[in-house]
Amino acid sequence: MVVDVNELKRVKEYLNTINRVDFKSITWVEYGQVCSIPDEAKTIARWDFVGLNNADFIFTGCYKNGFTE
């Protein structure tokens, strides 16, 4: 594997930028379409208490699956 250090730094800075933004002000888009978050108000309210960062909302799949009880 060859890793472009400059690209890695660019991606890390992009993630840092996403994580600095107020979560509720983010519009999540996938394949050019605004994501439909299941039970959006409840999911976002619960996300505030999870303690993970904004990017983790995507990486954990919460934006697609919401919270499982």
Image: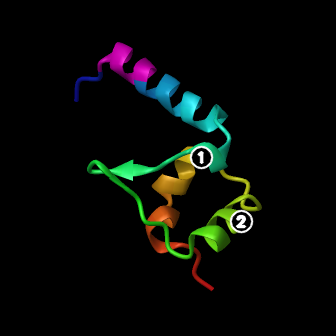
Question: Residue 7 vs residue 67: left or right?
Answer: left
Compared to 46, does 69 lie above or below?
A: below
What type of secondary structure mainly makes up the magenta span?
helix
Instruction: Inspect the image, locate mark 2, and give the three-letter code of the amino acid beneath it.
Output: Ala
Whether residue 64 is visible here, answered yes or no, is: yes
What is the number of the mark on residue 30? none
Q: Is residue 43 magenta?
A: no
Q: Position of residue 4 (x, y in %)?
A: 30, 18
Q: Residue at x 59, y 75 (%)?
A: 67
Q: Quadrant of residue 39?
A: bottom right
Q: Position of residue 41 (x, y in %)?
A: 64, 69
Q: Which residue is mark 2?
A: 45
Compared to 3, does 63 lie above or below?
A: below
Report the magenta residues as a range.
4-10
Compared to 53, does 15 lie above or below?
A: above
Q: Quadrant of the N terminus?
A: top left
Classify mark 2: helix, strand or loop: helix
Q: In the depicted view, which residue is nearer to us: 34 or 68?
A: 34
Q: Residue at x 71, y 68 (%)?
A: 46
Q: Position of residue 62 (x, y in %)?
A: 52, 65
Q: Is residue 7 magenta?
A: yes
Q: Which residue is mark 1?
A: 54
Mark 1 burial class by Cα count in 10 Å: few <14, some 14-19, many 20+ = many
**The residue positioned farthest toward the left in the image shown:** 1
Instruction: Inspect the image, locate mark 1, and give the three-letter code of the amino acid beneath it.
Output: Asn
